[in-house]
Image (cartoon, grey):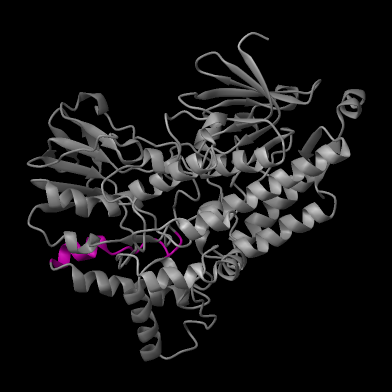
Amino acid sequence: MRNTEHFDVVVVGAGFAGLYLLHKLRGMGLSAVALEAADGVGGTWYWNRYPGARCDVESMQYSYSFDEALQQEWRWSERFATQPEILRYANHVADRFDLRRDIRFETRVTGAEFDAARDLWTARTEKGASFTGRFCVMATGCLSSARLPDFKGMASFKGPSYHTGHWPHEGVDFTGLRVGVIGTGSSAIQAIPVIAAQAKHVTIFQRTPNFSIPAHNRPMDPAYEQSWKGDYPARRQKAREMRTGIDYPINPVSALEVDEAERERTYEDRWQAGSTAFMAAFGDLILDKAANDTAAEFVRRKIRSIVEDAETAELLCPHNHPIGTKRICVDTGYFETFNRDNVTLVDVRKAPIEEITPQGVRTAEREYEVDAIVFATGFDAMTGTLLAMDIRGRDGLTLARKWEAGPVTYLGLMVAGFPNMFLVTGPGSPSVLSNMIVSIEQHVDWITAAMGRLRQQGVTRIEATEAAETEWVRHANEVAHRTLYPQANSWYMGVNVPGKPQVFMPYIGGVGAYRQICDEVAAEGYRGFALSSRAQAAAAE
């Protein structure tokens, strides 16, 4: 076949999942290629270069654990690493393990199709090249399809506009400019303080306020760094067993079992410590609405104490979702930014944006003239990148058709009807509710171990059964509805994308429990998967 290259495994994506896959597959003696749309590695950290971008998981934990020398030798400079530092780390890993020779950059996959007669996948690119492999692994990331709103007049604006998820690599100088920022989610909460410090004026268009906890970021303390490096194996193992894949103190006590004074002290201690560990202040904050209300009201009181203008403070106080059921944000000076003279908050729930004009943004009440617009409007999360490709499984079944009522998977790893196609941190796995690198390593280890066992047994096809997939979706939904998460209109549910089915996409049962389930499935000969050889499959068809 002209313009076709053949490999054992075709990997789509060269972010943290794709890099680790290449390393593991090479060690197994399997040939692999990673197809990457960007001209460099890093995935989400390649694209998301907006001002203030940094990780909300501590640096000592947001890193690979698979190589002891790597985790001992790499030095993080801050408690929470910035995007440039994380991207440097990804490039260091690519160079250290000589991974670039197996990556095709600037190669965007437009479709992939399964050939049942040969048990092979063929991935096709926008440049017309094809790559075949026994297995296809979608390492496309959960937050990789930036979503622009469909406001009237989007193309009419005369100034520059940017999306936080596709930021110019050369950076943007907002000095002396009037900037409009649309959105107040995680990216905006990080970007707004930095933009406000530079711009002449910033107008922030907020539809839904979000809860945010201070990061209390600081330069890396050598003693703290050594406390991790001196005990990395044990601490990594502990993180793998935690619900979020992050090793931080968990308080199992109910928020309702202690008196108000102790509850207040506990929340204050967590607030001063900073980070998403705030949500572990008590054991029932995501399970019990009354308990959750105590945490939410504590944060609202903090917002009111920080923001000087009472009306602005109330606009910034979330009331429409339990705290933590949308992505809990971690910030550096976000609420303090609204005390600046050059910052204006506009409530677009009260007066919705009607159109983008040549001069700026028009709401139902008035027009706001700006020189530049920043769209911090999020992503088509978890499924957007997959559904942007024409993926076809057995009998021509498209993934878009399979998922038209919402994403269904078995373990977030495979989709019935799509043999030999694995997903890394797909819907139905902990993914975005966890430390992504912990979940990535777990999935890559499981997937590559499965490939190794199948090869030993002469198996050429593995496919999730419809029954196992149906049961896993039922279980995942049942677990989700034991919590408060479905009460929020969040991107976890796909609410931010018009027309997208509203299904709670990640698995809320916890990283540790999920890992145990996956290990048991493998130990039982891949329970819930149909295994066959090419000859058996041909005879059956």
Left or right: residue 41 compared with residue 179: right
> In terms of depth relative to the viewer, which is nearer, 113 or 478?
113
| Residue 143 screen position, x and y as percent | 46, 43
Residue 411 visible in the shown view: no
Q: Quadrant of residue 509?
A: bottom right
Q: Which residues are magenta?
A: 309-325
Left or right: residue 143 compared with residue 451: left
| Residue 454 screen position, x and y as percent | 82, 40
Quadrant position of the N terminus in the picture: top right
| Residue 139 screen position, x and y as percent | 57, 39
> In terms of depth relative to the viewer, which is nearer, 419 or 42?
42
Give yes or no for residue 225 being in the magenta stretch.
Answer: no
| Residue 193 screen position, x and y as percent | 21, 55
Residue at the image position 36 percent from the left and 50 percent from the top:
85
> In terms of depth relative to the viewer, which is nearer, 232 or 158?
232
Quadrant position of the C terminus in the picture: top right
Residue at the image position 29 percent from the left and 54 percent from the top:
189
